[in-house]
Image (cartoon, rainbow, N blue to C red):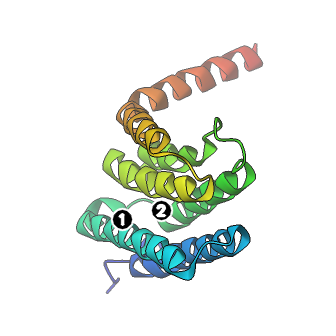
């Protein structure tokens, strides 16, 4: 009998909380130490991130019947989340570039719009901490991330159309 929280022999879904949480806490501790943030402020952000990741994993477990049929779901989720964290680290000094929302958009396009919302919000709070963004910038990013996730199905169709067009012209 196959355990319900496994998807095609990959990482169990219950381990996502530990893996994503560990990545986030390490990144927050690194940036907190680098900026000279107090231990209490760093701890607050770690707890906030862990709670948001727990909500993401709870949502995934509640939607388990949809997720278990998707091959490499856990690997793609971890890769998109870690890739977004790396992109946030790369552009942390440039507050006009918000590449960290790409992970949430990819998850919204590939899997589920609501899961994309949750991941996008988590990454926006992380980017706000790393880039020391103002409240206005964070609210702007929350609105932009929400709109991007809402339009993810249309972007997926547009991306598919562009890829098919390029393939057609490449074959000619």
Q: Is residue 140 left or right of residue 54?
A: right
Residue at image location 49% in from the left, 51% down from the top: 124
Q: Foreground: 11 or 140?
A: 140
Q: Position of residue 6 (x, y in %)?
A: 40, 77
Q: Foreground: 92 or 16?
A: 92
Residue at image location 31% in from the left, 78% down from the top: 4
Residue at image location 30% in from the left, 59% down from the top: 66
Residue at image location 47% in from the left, 70% down from the top: 45
Quadrant in the picture for residue 140: top left
Q: CA distance from mark 2 to mark 1?
A: 14 Å
Is residue 9 among the parts visible in the rendering? Answer: no
Of all residues, the one furthest to the left in this rendering is 62
Q: Is residue 31 left or right of residue 143?
A: right
Q: Foreground: 87 or 126?
A: 126
Q: Quadrant of the N terminus?
A: bottom left
Q: Which residue is mark 1?
A: 56
Is residue 111 among the parts visible in the rendering? Answer: yes
Q: Which residue is mark 2?
A: 73
Q: Mark 1, residues whose alpha carbon is within 10 Å: few (<14), some, or many (≥20)? A: many
In the image, residue 151 sits, relative to residue 72, either above or below, namely: above
Q: Mark 2, residues whose alpha carbon is within 10 Å: few (<14), some, or many (≥20)? A: many
Q: Quadrant of the C terminus?
A: top right
Of all residues, the one furthest to the bottom in this rendering is 1
In the image, residue 96 sits, relative to residue 128, either above or below, namely: above
Q: Position of residue 3 (x, y in %)?
A: 33, 83
């Amino acid at each position: 009998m196959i355990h319900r929280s496994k998807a095609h022999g990959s990482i169990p879904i219950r381990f996502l909380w530990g893996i994503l949480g560990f990545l986030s806490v390490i990144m927050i501790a690194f940036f907190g130490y680098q900026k000279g943030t107090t231990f209490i402020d760093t701890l607050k952000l770690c707890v906030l991130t862990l709670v948001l990741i727990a909500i993401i994993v709870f949502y995934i477990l509640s939607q388990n019947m949809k997720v278990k049929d998707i091959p490499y779901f856990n690997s793609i989720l971890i890769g998109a989340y870690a890739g977004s964290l790396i992109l946030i680290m790369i552009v942390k000094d440039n507050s006009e570039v918000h590449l960290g929302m790409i992970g949430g958009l990819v998850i919204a396009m590939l899997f589920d719009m609501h899961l994309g919302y949750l991941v996008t919000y988590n990454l926006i709070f992380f980017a706000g901490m790393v880039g020391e963004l103002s409240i206005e910038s964070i609210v702007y990013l929350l609105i932009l991330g929400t709109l991007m996730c809402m339009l993810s199905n249309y972007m997926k169709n547009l991306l598919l159309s562009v890829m098919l067009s390029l393939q057609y012209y490449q074959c000619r």
